[in-house]
Image (tube, coloured by chain):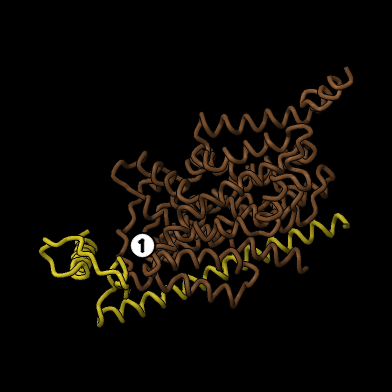
Amino acid sequence: MDTSNLLNDGFTLMLFGMGFVFIFLTMLVIATTIMSTLITRYERNVGILPEEGVPSPTAVIPHHEHPHSTSESPADDTTVISVISAAVNKFRSRHK
Amino acid sequence: MENILHLWENTGLYQMQPGQGIMIAIGMLLLYLAINKNFEPLLLVPIGFGGVLANIPGAGLAEHGGILHIFYSVGIESGAFPLIIFMGVGAMTDFGPLLANPRTLFLGAAAQFGIFATLMGAVALSTLGIFDFSLADAAAIGIIGGADGPTSIYVASKLAPDLLGAIAVASYSYMALVPLIQPPIMRLLTTEAERKIKMVQQRHVSQREKIIFPLLLLLLVAFLLPDAAPLLGMFCFGNLMKECAVVDRLSNTTQNSLINTVTIFLGLAVGSKLSADKFLDLTTLGILLLGMIAFGIGTASGVLMAKIMNKISTAPINPLIGSAGVSAVPMAARVSNKLGLESDPHNFLLMHAMGPNVAGVIGSAVAAGIMINYVTGG
């Protein structure tokens, strides 16, 4: 390959590559922000998913890990925790 | 007497060439670094041992039909091993910090400048006649700056299989050297006041967001850059398995036994590329040097980008997290955290730095896709 040609190719690839990386990640930022806003709004109405996932239908008889636990279900716990942490966040952002 | 002579001619000592001796010593050095100095032992132990095996005179382990050559053609030539590793990395990645602050994706983008600047450097060196790199070689060398082992190996296996040994060794050794390479650059580019900047507490990211994010990323890759789909597709698949929490068995296998199994074979196969005739070459020295430069430029551009963003945006951004934009998860984020603590013992940057850190993984996979697209298609 011709040497000046090679240098040109390299330069084009650099501009093209860097440009594309930025365009791609910018679109990802936009898409992610929209997605987060939509989900936050949606979850305000229906509540959040439990962190450990939806219990799957299974042939195995469910084994209760905390028979003496005071709360009714682990899902309740996580909801309570997330509500508390949201409140703490709001408090901190107001009282800086 | 003739039998004894025959036996002597078949010993390693008789057949040993000086190059092989040196390569066995280099393999031993890698083992020493891994075992004694704890430099990326999970990779350098198999790579170092593979390097020793590949250079045993007369055994031909790395030649056609040898066991290391079989590992190489099955796993690396086909591109399978790096992709399986990427799936495991996906299953170990938590996108929470990134989702809490999506702007950190820009830091991951900026740090990829190291890749392209080094590509230019490699091309310039061949124009000057110092080395003889083609555009494909230069692209594969540049990707070392992405500080991402599997991505480097994937790109090198596609674009410059001859340089694979040197590129893999360079990228893994620099990943181990992150705590040494990055801090001087970061200190040079930031002021004490900037290092003390405190960042706003991250918001809570819900599980639904974490489940949808890999799907969103996958769709974006599918629409915009199908060449990055093998890498990012596997990455997203691994991450979805982890976040959806209904296939814990698969997710656990992916992030433990599967990735470990593949790492063993990947390491040995990379080691097989450390044969004397390919590795003992000035080119290798050039690759090691260029890789180091790539790393430095990537770190610097990440930090500079963070400084710019700090000027523009309302929420403060500590420039130290910019350096985490060169993937190297989670080492680079830990370095950011450590430097932050040096300036202010109450300033914990780790979670903030994880955002650019995983953004760097996405960024370097995108850069890899573009290079493969441009070089093979153009």
The residue drawn where x is 64% and y is 61% is B368
Three-letter code, disc 1: Ala
Instruction: Say which quarter of the image contains residue A95.
Output: bottom left
| Position in image of residue B58 (x %, y %) | 79, 33
Extreme residue toward the top, this view: B1
Q: Colour of chain B?
A: brown
Percent coordinates x, y for residue A37 in the rendering: 36, 77
Task: Tell me if B222 is positioned left or right of B61 in this view.
Answer: left
> B281 or B349: which is nearer to us?
B281
Placement of B271 over or under A25, stated as above or below: above
- Identify whether B38 is placed above or below B375: above
Q: Which shade is chain A?
A: yellow
Residue in view at x 48 percent, y 58 percent: B254
Q: Is residue B324 left or right of residue B19?
A: left
Helix, strand or loop at mark 1: loop
Which chain is indicated by disc 1? B
